[in-house]
Structures are given as structure tokens and as C-alpha cells.
Image: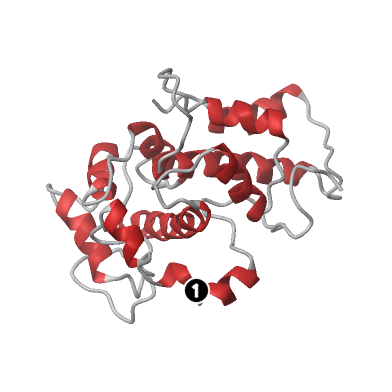
Amino acid sequence: MSSYTRPNSSQQSYAPSAPSLPDSFDQQQNHAYDSPPPSDYMRQQHQPSPSYAAGYGRSEYSYGYSGFPQGTHPDVIRSFQMVDRDRSGYIDENELQQALSSGYQRFNIGTIRLLMFLFKNPHDPLRIGPNEFAALWSCLGQWRAIFERYDKDRNGKIDLFELRDALYGIGYAIPPPVLKVLISKYDDGSGKKIELNFDDFVECGMILKGLTERFKQKDSRYTGTATFNYDEFMSMVIPFLVSYD
């Protein structure tokens, strides 16, 4: 069995989402991502408004804006409306950054552009609509659950060892040299210990998940090895390694 992913990893093809937390964790935590983080965490990190971890998309109703999936929580709709100032029904990368940064932290533009790429609207690749926004919001809720589980010291950041545990916990057994290269992308040159904010963690996780799932498409027998020609390799890697900054 290859070390690129653990035996119990999901076999589904790549989609813009987060890997599932282990069933044992869901049972122990009573589906923690359906409710806000513990109060001590909120006091340290300033509770988002609205919260990614509040289980949005599972309400029994939605209102006020066409195009959202049935059951979209009103707060998700309001977040979209607040930044869609021209009422076009679409938002661009700057408006998305405003929507996701409100009340919590400022998402860096590199992560925003990656999210725009992954959740792009088929009719307008430079903007996303209500359906894509709702899916993106739900995806961030999944990543938030993973982030909070492995932020052991509750400082709102993930260090090298926490990142290693988080990736292994969701099925990616990354070799230490590769992990160091991965986290070095977030070195600001200050000489301080490298730590990832939530938005950096999302970017890192989604790139890794995307590349792994693309690799699995060629590794049909799940052996940990695959054969690519140059064109196939470039088409797999480039979308996830282009500069979003």
C-alpha cells in the first residue's frame, strides 16, 4: 500500500470539498461541525458572523434570493446579498473576499482565487452565483471542522506537526520532506515558526486533495504508482500550482 494516502481514504473522484472526518470522531464529538466552536475557542478567535461551522445549508427553509439551493440558511443568503451590491446575482473575487472575511479574518486573495477557480460558474468563470456560493460555504464548514480538531493549542493557527496530524487524520500520509516543502510555501521570511491561518490551511488542503484525487484517477488499482505522459502530467498539476497571488 502506498504512503500517499491511508487505506481508509475516500475513493471518490476529486470535487471541491473537504475529506470526511473519521466516523469515530463524529460520534465522539456529536457532529461538532453542525454547531459553533466551543466558547473558549470563540473568545480567542472572535466568533465569525455568520459562522462557517453552524451547519448552513441544512435549514428547512430559504428566502429572499433566487438561485440558492433549497434549504440554504438565511444567513448565507444575507452574506451573499451584502456584497452583491449591483444585485446582478453574481459576485467577483473582491466581493467574495469581503463575504468570507466579514467578522472573522481576512482571507488572502490567493486563497480566494483558488476558491473562485474550484467553484467557478460555468456561465461566468470570473464570478460565482448563489449556487456556487452555497457550495463553497458548505465546503469551508467542512474544512473548519478539520482545522478546529487539529488546532490543539487553540491559537487559531496550524503548525507543522498539527498539519501533519490533520493530513494524516483525513487520509493523507505525507512524507516528512514533502510536508516541509509544502509548509515552506507559507514562510513569510521573518524567521518565526511557520504556522497556517485558516485560509492558508484551506488552500493547502484543497490543493493536496485535488492533486491526490487526480493521481487516483490514473492509479486505478490503488497501488500508489501511476504512469503519465508529459501532457497528462501538466494538465494534472498546472491547475493547482499556478500562482493565485
Q: Position of residue 5 (x, y in %)?
A: 74, 48
Residue drawn 55% across the image and 33% down it: 240
Give the quarter of the image for residue 48.
Answer: bottom left
Which residue is at the front of the view, 219 or 20?
A: 20
Judging depth in this view, the residue of 15 and 51 nearest the camera is 51
Residue 4 seen from this side: yes
Where's residue 172, x and y in %? Answer: 68, 47
| Amino acid type shown at disc 1 | His
Q: How many marks?
A: 1
Residue drawn at 58 percent across, 27 percent down = 238
Q: Nearer the viewer, residue 166 or 230?
A: 166
Q: Say whether residue 215 is left or right of residue 121.
A: right
In the image, what residue occupies the spot 31% across and 42% down? 127
The answer to whether residue 66 is seen in the rendering is no
- 145 is higher (above) or lower (below) than 94: below
Where disc 1 sits, the SS reads loop
Which residue in the protein does label 1 denote? Answer: 31
Residue positioned most to the left: 86
Residue sitting at x 47%, y 24%: 187
Between residue 192 and residue 86, name the one nearer to us: 192
Colour option used: secondary structure
Q: Is residue 223 above or below residue 138?
A: above
Task: Return the x and y of residue 121 as percentages of the image width and height.
Answer: 39, 47
